[in-house]
Amino acid sequence: MMRSKVLSLVPRATGVCRHMSTATKLTTVAVDDKTGIATLTMNRPPVNGLNLDLLRDLNQSIGEVEGNKSRGLILTSSNPTIFSAGLDILEMYKPDKDRIREFWTALQDVWLALYGSSVPTAAAINGHSPAGGCLLATSCEYRVMLPKFTIGLNETKLGIVAPKWFMSSFLSVLPRREAERALNQGRMFTTEEALSIGLIDEVAISKEQALDKCAQFIGTFAKVNPLARSLTKQQLRAVELQQLENERAQDLERFLFFVNQPSVQKGLGIYLESLKKKAKN
Ligand SMILES: CCCCC/C=C/C(=O)SCCNC(=O)CCNC(=O)[C@H](O)C(C)(C)COP(=O)(O)OP(=O)(O)OC[C@H]1O[C@@H](n2cnc3c(N)ncnc32)[C@H](O)[C@@H]1OP(=O)(O)O
């Protein structure tokens, strides 16, 4: 059957998958031959902490999906209980001064690539998704989440501040009043709460169903002209994307200044200790 004909049907993420040759170590990209949809899977145990290496691999994989004419991108995790624990705090605690610059620049790159992606994007959130995990999910156009997990921007609870572009992604999904309150509170939402507030679009009972629902969302664009769709998306997102493009250097300096404050370092150290203590019990 012709590729375009198949795509006019409701797609299912169950076709034969061909792994791309350039798949990297901490991410894999598998393209469904029937639907043409690429599934990008994060695979950095134990919690998909976004360190420099994972960010670089994510960036490379998003670039590959952009380049290989995939019909859409589904972002998910190989961990059965964690989508992503957000930024790897070890990158920010007592940081190496060159590496932390590369780290933040790589994070900016990932956001620009994912939020600005020309293909339809969806997140199959198959586990907890705090902070940077929520950033990835809200950079996508559609979110399907499994029950009994949590999602949100919890930065204020850690004594840190989400940068403007984290807020932009959040605000592209939630009404301003809800976004403002949740950000100030550092609130983590359960799956059910996230659905009722509109932070996610659907709940699925399994990862397979989540992938399927994401594929169905991407399938809704099958009859829409791809160029018109992608230019429309990019125009709608242009203000936020341009703002970061224009302020990349200042954004980096702001982050470095903030993260190097002794009080912030102390807070991150205490938080890391509490995570480690919790992990031991
Ligand atoms: C300064 C400006 C920056 C602004 C933007 C910041 C954005 C961010 O993303 S900051 C990171 C925020 N993330 C979190 O608050 C999540 C913290 N983690 C958790 O809540 C939990 O780990 C979990 C719900 C994601 C998973 O729980 P569980 O399955 O029970 O796993 P453990 O808690 O036992 O963790 C296992 C292992 O992983 C370490 N770890 C967890 N999260 C992080 C992290 N974000 N960075 C670094 N390391 C992390 C945890 O310490 C355990 O380590 P070990 O003790 O060595 O096994």
Image (tube, rainbow, N blue to C red):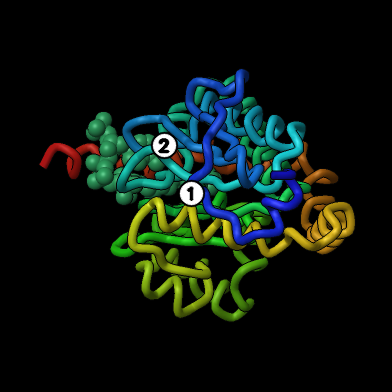
Q: Position of residue 177 (x, y in %)?
A: 59, 80
Quadrant of ligand 1: it is: top left
- Report which quarter residue 194 is drawn in: bottom left
The crowding category of the residue bearing disc 1, from other C-alpha atoms within 10 Å (few below 14, some 14 to 19, many at least 20), is many
User: Does residue 205 appear left or right of residue 104 in this picture?
Assistant: left
Return the residue nearer the eye: 15 or 240: 15
Image coordinates of residue 142 in percent, x first then y, are 59, 61
Indicate left or right for 108 with 142 as reference: right
Q: Secondary structure at mark 1?
A: helix
Residue occupied by mark 1: 133
In the rendered image, the vertical position of residue 62 relative to residue 3, given as above or below = above
Query: Position of 84 compared to 19: left or right?
Result: left
Determine whether the beta carbon of the residue marked 1 sits less than 8 angstroms from the nearest atom of ligand 1.
yes
Mark seen at residue 48 = 2
The answer to whether the residue labelled 2 contacts the one labelled 1, judged by CB atoms less than 8 Å apart, is yes
Q: x and y percent of residue 18 in the render? A: 56, 29
